[in-house]
Amino acid sequence: MSLNKPIPMKRFAGKIFFGFLFLNVAAISFGQTYLGLTTGYVITTPHASFSSSPYIFGDLNYHNSFYISADYREEYHKQLSLGASVLYTFQNTDYHVRSGGHGGSSTTDGLFSYGYLDFYFYPEFSYGEKAQFYFNFGPYFGFLLHSNASGTQSWIQYSLDSIGPKKGTKELDGRENEYLNFLTFGLKIGIGVRYALNDKINLHADFSNRIGSMDLSTEGYFKYLTNIFFAIGVEIKIKHKERPAKE
């Protein structure tokens, strides 16, 4: 049931990173540098594949999920910034997957708790002065940090060589990383409002949506995830640079 297969995303992720680094040079030259913290609640929805095998059924229930991120933003001018965030995302998931065929069936029921370290790179467009409305989008990729599972996996196998079916049960206890992808990736889009308390400190609230690869293996029944983030945060200007004077 392992989904720990090589994913040809390393070169793609590397190009994104170095491309972002190249674009950031212009902003660093005469932009404003901000560091911040953001935290929020995550609503996760898995999406099934209608082309999946009729012998596979899956049900995932994500709950009690949250995230916290460290944010970096270079404000080139009031309407354009380049940013990067490092997110720790925690998920609790009730997992039920049943697969079968003429030779037998397998059922897995468990509770999975796990965390990913995600990296998000984005341009951001904003409008306003003291209160700013903003929009950002960009790619993300994440790496599995930890996991824990509890539950059971049971199976039954039919064979012409035996009188009756063979049965077995395995307890899920511990990391159980064979059920989780080490690497996830996708696209994130967000909107929000930022309010300047003073010249140094900004508060913000945002809503974002991302679509990406599955974190848990369901033998192909679910193909991708959408995550909705509701968050609040604060950022501090750590470096002020004079912008070029307008002619």
Image: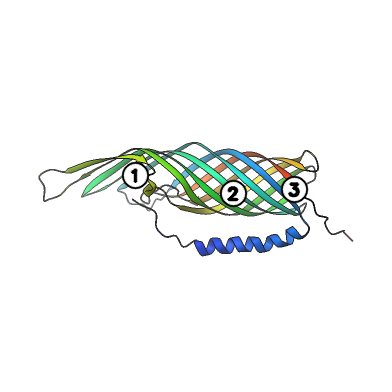
Q: How many marks?
A: 3
**Type of amino acid at the residue the image marks with label 2:** Val
On screen, residue 143 versus residue 247, left or right, reads: left
Dot 2 crowding, Cα within 10 Å, few <14, some 14–19, many 20+: some
The residue that label 2 is drawn on is 86
The residue that label 1 is drawn on is 57
Dot 3 crowding, Cα within 10 Å, few <14, some 14–19, many 20+: few
- Counting from the top left corner in percent of width and height, residue 214 is at 45, 49
The residue that label 3 is drawn on is 238
User: How far is disc 3 from disc 2 in space, using C-alphas?
Assistant: 18 Å
Label 3 with label 1: CB-CB less than 8 Å: no
**Type of amino acid at the residue the image marks with label 3:** Ile
Q: Earlier in the sequence, mark 1 or mark 2?
A: 1
On screen, residue 171 versus residue 136, left or right, reads: left
In depth, the one of 77 and 113 nearer the eye is 113
Under circle 1, the secondary element is strand
Residue in view at x 56 percent, y 63 percent: 14
**Type of amino acid at the residue the image marks with label 1:** Phe
User: How far is disc 3 from disc 1 in space, using C-alphas?
Assistant: 51 Å
State the image quarter where residue 108 is shown: top left
Q: Nearer the viewer, mark 3 or mark 2?
A: 3
Q: State the quadrant of the C terminus.
A: bottom right
Q: Is residue 27 above or below residue 96?
A: below
User: How far is disc 1 from disc 2 in space, using C-alphas?
Assistant: 34 Å
On screen, residue 210 versus residue 130, left or right, reads: left
